Amino acid sequence: MIPRYSRPDMVKIWEPENRFRIWFEIEAHATDALAQRGVVPASAAQALWKWWDTNPTIDVAAIDAIEAVTKHDVIAFLTWVAEQVGDEARFMHQGMTSSDVLDTCLAVQLTQATDLLLADMDALLVAIKTRAMEHKFTPTIGRSHGIHAEPVTFGMKLAQAYAEFARGRERLVAARAEIATCAISGAVGTFANIDPEVEAHVAAKLGLAVEPVSTQVIPRDRHAMYFATLGVIASSIERLATEVRHLQRTEVLEAEEYFSPGQKGSSAMPHKRNPVFTENLTGLARMVRGYVTPALENVALWHERDISHSSVERYIGPDATITLDFALGRLTGVIDKLLIYPERMQKNLDRMGGLVHSQRVLLALTQAGISREDSYRIVQRNAMKVWESDGAESLMELLKADADVTAKMTAAEIEERFNLDYHFKHIDTIFDRVFG
């Protein structure tokens, strides 16, 4: 992942040194378990941990140089460790295969990454909830098909986003559990040369569950579900980012990204204040979703294993988690500093001459004894006059002048149907459902 869209804590998880350290722990814990069962000398495990306890520097360049000859990354690592530890290192990797190390390591890295993503989600949820409570009863127009529909509150818009990301967090917790499995089962997964208790020991030390059937590799349906979950969260990011982008349009301008001192919007037009962060988030969401299909395609491996998944995961593991981590952090900042304009929201609410209250009049006429079809026709013919006048006409005044309406409703009854607060009587209920 490029540094522009990376944050250091997530990047560290995918750096070679962290990967090799996890590899060592897998090998050393397995050697411990083998020593406990008398398969290898106890001195072998002790030698490994004695060297490790000196806090050695992982010489990535040296391991890479060995791999340039062996063309095999795990063998290169084992060779380098043996050079550091000495003769006792020959008991490492007894009965194991490369995938035992690689797949278990990937599980550790993905759980580490998920813990950061869960913290990101928590921070985002706090930011959304704070702004939702701030604007719980701030009136704004609800839109369907991009067209004025009926009044909502800006807090309700944010409550919807909160509920969506809360669901995303629950899915991420489930995805973490799905991906956190350990496989130390040897070639083709039969445990022929290593006891299942070794796997259980390593799993417990690394905080993982044992993989019931690993067939040499951990089944990739787990990874597919994991990356699909990241893709859904990315789509939720885009949904909220798109809302902000629409609200920042000049014709709307009900909310906008914070514009910092010294910030520039355009190299040519000094007046510009563009939604650059939310546009960026839209692009990042596309990237995270782009990693879902390769993960799905990785499920169908040949027989007990092949390595067609390997190159894919070396890309998508780091890139998807690093990108999503950055995007969640950026969105949190956008929401936390979002500039919100209640006066403009009210102005937009009022701009179409009260059309947003048409349904209430329709319902009142049906309750007064007019058929739904006729009620719709009466209200629509007046509403279209307002629409065609671009809000210059008033729906309320037109209805008061319509004999079909006044035959069933008094002026006061008509006016009551234009009460904005009527639409917000259940906002508390919605908030209780979302926030408890």
Image (tube, rainbow, N blue to C red):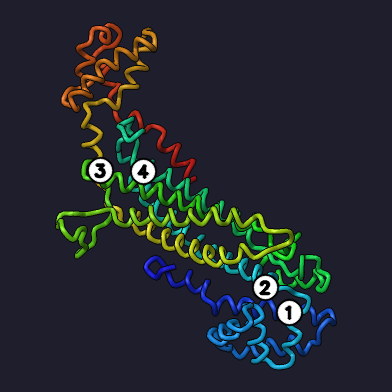
Mark closest to the chain's N terminus, 4 or 3: 4
* Quadrant hosting residue 43: bottom right
Residue occupied by mark 2 = 101
Residue occupied by mark 4 = 155
Q: Secondary structure at mark 2?
A: helix
Q: Is residue 337 above or below residue 56?
A: above
Q: Secondary structure at mark 4?
A: helix
Q: CA distance from mark 4 to mark 3?
A: 11 Å
Residue occupied by mark 1 = 93
* Quadrant hosting residue 346: top left
**Is the C-beta separation of discs 4 and 3 under 8 Å?**
no
Q: Nearer the viewer, residue 29 or 72?
A: 72
Q: Nearer the viewer, residue 101 or 158?
A: 101
Q: CA distance from mark 1 to mark 2?
A: 9 Å
Q: Name which residue type carries label 2.
A: Val
**Badge 2: how crowded within 10 Å, few (<14), some, or many (20+)?**
many
x, y (%) of residue 185?
Answer: 76, 68
